[in-house]
Image: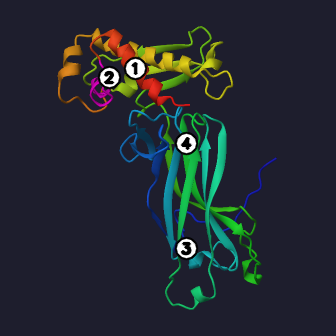
Amino acid sequence: MAGQLFLYPTITNEENYGLKVLNKGWSVYYHNAENELIELDYKPVELNDRINYIETDGLWDADSCDILLSNRIVLTDFRNLFGSSGIACKNAKLGVSAIWTSADSRQRSSVAGGVFNVTEEDYKTEDDLTSVEIDLDVAFPKAALKGDVNVSVVIYIAEPGIPEYDEMHLANEYGFILGTIDSFTLKLDGNGSLFPVFEVYETDKPLWYVRCDWLDPLSDAFSESVSININTAHKNYKYIDQTQKTFCKQLLIETMSAAVCCIIEEARNSAFWDQIISDESQESGSVAEAIQYFQNTLEWDLTSPLTVSESARKYFDRRMVD
């Protein structure tokens, strides 16, 4: 059966009814092991792209840390949204909400921001002086999401009004979405992650394996040529799945430590190793830059396979807090 088609007036790219939206921009935070709130930077996957990835500080990842998104939306000149020539009854109340979806995690929910309306006083001025600030805060616990998180900021009917004779054509049902005023997508894994971990489903593969497909580690992108693959089809996956009661933190630490050791040793065995660890500047995003990050920022000892193994285990012990 075909879905019901609504022809109510709504906010669109072509018609915003004079509404002005000031978007402060999304901020991304997480809590570290000391429960301090730490801000993370992010940037578009490609120039002018609305999909963003987190520039990790070396301690955050989606499996072991929470993540919080925060924004402030300022709406002005919204008087014309109300009344017969607008999108809602004159005495209705509208709300702002953040609706988030994660297809990879099969989750969807919303977080209410604030409510606004117009009063008789608002109509007494010649100019539209209406204004409201809406704070939006969306929090996700650790290991709750994977892949992309899409956030849409919408205006909806928070409190239906009593329609006048010339307002019968307006939407007036609680929760009805009247338009989207902002959208934001954040990648939680893959490109931009310090450790590019991907889940695969392969019945003939081990629990985990590493791919190092670079030709020139001085220029090839780390995010495109390296992958740590976790096999969800393996019988022991339940022991490194943080959503399961059988989860074993130490096994995950050993898995990640060994995987990163493989990556570094693969680079060590290449003809580029001396340049990788000694050149002062490396191409942005390259395999060489990532390995220098381990050495210079995370202060790993890359002298030998033994010292790398010890550094990696210390790092993941510290990062994967209970």
Cα gap from disc 4 to disc 1, whole angstroms: 29 Å
Point out the frontmost of discs 4 and 1.
1
Residue extending furthest toward the right: 1
- Within 10 Å of disc 2 (Cα), the crowding (few <14, some 14-19, many 20+) is many
Could you tell which of marks 1 and 2 lies nearer the N-terminus?
A: 2
The amino acid at mark 2 is Trp
Q: Which mark is residue 149?
A: 4
Q: Which residue is mark 3?
A: 17
Residue annotated with mark 1: 312
Q: Nearer the viewer, residue 115 or 244?
A: 244
Q: Which residues are magenta?
A: 287-301
Q: Nearer the viewer, mark 4 or mark 3?
A: 4
Say what amino acid the circle numbered 1 marks.
Ala
Q: Main secondary structure of the magenta part?
A: helix
Labels 1, 3: front one: 1
Judge depth for marks 2 and 4 and give the one in front.
Answer: 2
**Is residue 117 toward the left or the right of residue 170 in the image?**
left
Where is residue 22 shown, x and y percent of the image?
45, 66
Residue 308 in magenta stretch:
no
